[in-house]
Image: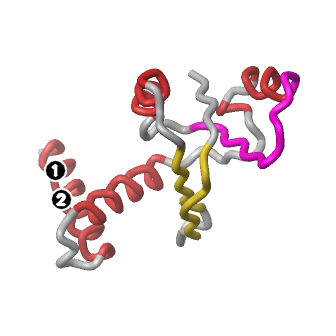
Amino acid sequence: MNVLAQGTLTKFQSLSDKGIKIEFVTREADPELSANCQALHQQDAILYITTGDLKTEQKQELDSQKVSEFSGIKPKTKSQELRNVLYVLWEQSDQTKDKEQLYNEWMDKFKNHIKEMLD
């Protein structure tokens, strides 16, 4: 699925895993754009950001790219994906515990669950 939209970069944040978190705001979105963005939520994607015009050839080249073949993206390991999900859980919680404490608790729960399956 491809989404092409004009927007404004409103937030940029460097992350501890050397990734970046960026946030864009679009003008009023039509139902198709909203539905496509909802379908892409939490999906790996290729980002191409330009302040100039997007030429037809550039769009065609981008449309032919596959995320798995894109040289600028290193696939995340399963442990990195799990850590990211736990971080989102921490962000959405009341944050009474620090993120490392929550991570350690959840990892212990997961480890104990696997141990129970071994018995």
Q: CA distance from mark 1 to mark 2?
A: 6 Å
Q: Which element type, helix, strand or loop, lies under badge 1?
A: helix
Q: Looking at the image, is 75 positioned above or below residue 65? A: below
Look at 31% across and 73% down and name the residue there. 99
Look at 45% across and 47% down and name the residue there. 78
Furthest residue toward front? 28
Q: Which mark is residue 113?
A: 1
- Of 116 and 25, which appears nearest the observer? 25
Residue type, label 2: Lys
Residue type, label 1: His
The reply to whether the magenta stretch includes residue 46 is yes
> Mark 1: few, some, or many residues within 10 Å (few <14, many ≥20)?
few
> Mark 2: few, some, or many residues within 10 Å (few <14, many ≥20)?
few
- Of 51 and 71, which appears nearest the observer? 51
Q: Which mark is residue 109?
A: 2
Where residue 38 appears, as percent x and y from the top left, is 40, 32
Where residue 18 appears, as percent x and y from the top left, is 61, 67
Look at 59% across and 28% down and name the residue there. 3
Look at 82% across and 25% down and name the residue there. 61
Where residue 82 appears, as percent x and y from the top left, is 38, 52
Q: Looking at the image, is 10 positioned above or below residue 100? A: above
* Image-based side of 5 in relation to 91, left or right: right
Specify start and end residues of the magenta stretch as a single range: 45-57
**Most common secondary structure along the magenta stretch:** loop
* Image-based side of 88 in relation to 28, left or right: left
Q: Looking at the image, is 114 positioned above or below residue 87? A: above
Q: Which element type, helix, strand or loop, lies under badge 2?
A: helix
* Cβ atoms at labels 1 and 2 below 8 Å apart: yes
Number of dots carrying numbers = 2
Quarter of the C terminus within the rendering: top left
